[in-house]
Amino acid sequence: MDKLLIEGGAPLHGEAAISGAKNAALPLLCAALLTREPLTLTHVPRLNDVDTMLGLLEQMGVKVFRETGVSGRADESTVTLDASGLDNPVAPYERVKTMRAAILVLGPLAARAGEAKVSLPGGCAIGARPVDQHIKGLAAMGAEISVLHGYILARAPRQKDGSTRLSGARLFTDMVTVTGTENLMMAACLAAGETVIENAAREPEVVDLANCLIKMGAQISGAGSDVIRIRGVASMHGATHRIMPDRIETGTYLCAAAATGGSIRLTGAAPGSLDAVIDKLTESGCRITIESDAINLAAPQRLTSVSLRTSPYPAFPTDMQAQFMAINSVAEGTAVIRETIFENRFMHAVELIRLGADIKIDGNTAVVHGVAKLDGATVMATDLRASAGLVIAGLVAEGETVIERIYHLDRGYEHLEQKLGALGARVRRLR
Ligand code: UD1
């Protein structure tokens, strides 16, 4: 298994281009299931999660064409999906267990194929993460749902006109769920009548998905607010859509530059999707200037601790919590970090402690006393964003840090070593 060797101490300087957003790409790939016509996505990040999703869609009968540079940008990857031959509406356990976002095929399959068999995801390192809200929503849309041998079986009801189609409904989710909102929004596109999703997730990735669905002929309003209305249409058509920039990748590089006392410029970013993160970095003493699609950060000599609480968008994202725990580890002062989205998302704390951080965990609260320096050691990546936190700590630590199990990073960060290397970091992959 690959490892990452980081020789710490080099401040990050220079410019890096932000990739397409993983969390927008995954639902957008699933949107192709909603139509017989081709859907072309540009700015597709080269990530293991994207490959896993493409493999899953191919297994269902979707034809996938990948190209590089067709959107006029030499390094950008374009994917065209043709789901006209969709004949196997099944997501097996092997795929869903490696990537929970595979659950995003459930809504589109039930909507277009009228049936779906999708494995339950099971637990993961950051908590139980059930999908009961996805199931509850589809059931409210008239789907016959059973859970058998670890699989969700969904079948759309027969309508008065003889068609097999979901029915529009008023949906309410018990908590704000991002993929739940996306699944139900996609399912509602082809349902008979109007669907209203209340308590909807407001994440920018939900808006990006809605924009693409609208290009495909869906009638959606309210995406980006907590009430989304979808008027079902009989069929949808092909479209071309550019995936939004990855706000978590952007935030991660900003934190890496902040922690190392560097100064960087990130291009092709979406600064408007990062208000909570930029706010905290400013509070920590960084100087940040924003242009329409670029962010510049200059770090102070030493950061000041910043306390935070994770919450659904537009509040502080749980996917940036580990990176801020890393920067607080070496900041001046004490920070209190509250994780309110996932019950077990402090796995990186014990690894940071191995590097010399002073962190106390009590339930969903972490108290981080900043120390003057971290020391390199061997640590283990436990999930995607935890790994990003460890990379930042490794960049700051004195001496060498080896991060094991970096397949987590390959799921979500495009060309990580190359981008960090170009910014002056001393990072090497050990195979
Ligand atoms: C998405 C993101 C992930 C991010 C998370 C929270 C993608 C592909 N992944 O994950 O990177 O960390 O949002 O911003 O976009 N819940 C239930 N029942 C459900 C659904 C969710 O109890 O049916 C709970 C979860 O266990 C969790 C909370 O609701 O505690 C929020 O989860 P959710 O927003 O659904 O996360 P994901 O969509 O899986």
Image (cartoon, rainbow, N blue to C red):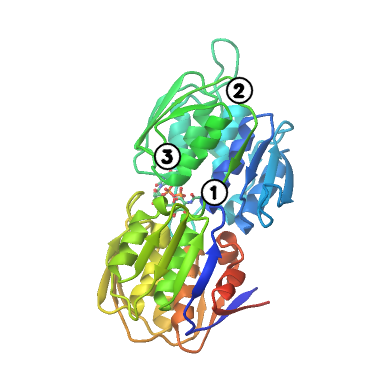
Camera-near label (3 vs 1) is 1
In which quadrant will I find the N terminus?
Answer: bottom right
Residue 175 horizontal/vertical position (percent): 35, 43
Of the two numbered discs 1 and 2 on the same chain, state the one appearing first in sequence.
1
Q: Which mark is residue 101?
A: 1
Which amino acid type is shown beneath numbered disc 2? Ser
- Element on which disc 2 rests: loop
Q: Which mark is residue 133?
A: 3
Give the spatial CA distance, label 3 vs label 1: 14 Å
Residue 150 horizontal/vertical position (percent): 56, 45
Note whether 380 is above or below 74 in the view shown: below
Residue 162 horizontal/vertical position (percent): 60, 12
- Please give the residue where the numbered disc 2 appears in the rendered image: 235
In which quadrant will I find the C terminus?
Answer: bottom right
Note whether 351 is above or below 188 in the view shown: below
Give the spatial CA distance, label 1 vs label 2: 25 Å
Give the spatial CA distance, label 3 vs label 2: 26 Å
Of the two numbered discs 3 and 1 on the same chain, state the one appearing first in sequence.
1
Q: State the residue in front, 86 or 73.
A: 73
User: Can residue 302 be seen by looking at this rendering?
Assistant: yes
Of the two numbered discs 3 and 2 on the same chain, state the one appearing first in sequence.
3
Which amino acid type is shown beneath numbered disc 3? Gln
Q: State the residue in front, 273 or 48.
A: 273
Mark 3 and ligand 1: say if the CB distance to the nearest ligand atom is below 8 Å: yes
- Element on which disc 1 rests: helix
Which amino acid type is shown beneath numbered disc 1? Ala
